[in-house]
Image (tube, rainbow, N blue to C red):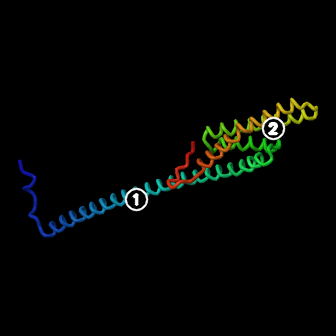
Amino acid sequence: MAWPFESLQPLTWEAFATLITGLLAVGAALIIGLRQVALLATQHAVQKTQADQNLKLRELEIKIAVLDRRSACIENIRPIWTRWIQDGSLSYEDATLLLSHAQQAGLVFSRSIYEDLIHFSTRISQVKRHYERSQDASGRNDKEDRLKWLNRAFALEDEIRPKFEDILGRMQNEARVTDDADLRLT
């Protein structure tokens, strides 16, 4: 039995050069491949960073939109509140607008503010009804009934005025932009 190496020819310079050239080509290809893998890893890291930044940007855009809606809600409610304070009563249109704005506030403010605004809208409507009943009694020349309804209206106004000031303050606090820009979306 003959060994496989016995039939080999002696190594010539040409064969040696071919072998070295092949090894160098494989080494170069390995180096290029490793650099491409490193480049792909860097590209992936850059893409991930860009995706994270895009997500943060979208979150900020949503927060700004919520802030704009909160500001608009406050701007819509404040004139109604001012008219009520100045005139002592609300028109039917203002009472309807107040309820509508309170319902819109439920979409952008916390649940407690929404519930308090709805409660306030209901109570302000009760004040309006008490005044109307007082006027009806005045038309009937029933002073006692008129005073009873006026006193109920005044007591209800005294009860709800500070509560509404508190609601507006809480609305402003939720709409306020702080240094950390942490807008609550609850």
The one nearer the camera, 81 or 88, is: 88
In the image: residue 168, left or right of residue 44: right
Q: Quadrant of residue 159?
A: top right
The picture places residue 89, in percent across and down from the top left corner, at 80, 43
The image shows residue 144 at horizontal and vertical percentages of 87, 30
Which image quarter holds the C terminus?
Answer: top right
Secondary structure at numbered mark 2: helix
Crowding at dot 1, Cα within 10 Å, few <14 / some 14-19 / many 20+, comes out as: few
Q: Amino acid at mark 2?
A: Lys
Q: Which residue is mark 1?
A: 43
In the displayed structure, does residue 141 sit left or right of residue 48?
right
Q: Which residue bears the numbered disc 2?
A: 128
Residue 112 vertical placement versus 14 (above, below):
above
Q: Residue at x 7, y 51 (%)?
A: 3
- Disc 1 to disc 2, how far (Cα)? 67 Å
Q: Position of residue 98 (x, y in %)?
A: 74, 43
> Which one is in front, 107 or 25?
107
In-front residue for pair 102/84? 84
The residue shown at (46%, 57%) is 50
Give the secondary structure at mark 1. Answer: helix
Amino acid type for the residue under numbered disc 1 = Gln
Does the image show residue 161?
Answer: yes
Taking the spot 71% from the left edge, 49% from the top edge, the residue there is 78
The image's mark for residue 26 is: none
State the image coordinates of residue 165 (x, y, percent, origin top left).
67, 44
Residue at the limit of the structure toward the right, as seen here: 140
Q: Quadrant of residue 84?
A: top right
Q: Select label 1 or label 2 by which is in front.
A: 2
All told, the count of numbered labels is 2
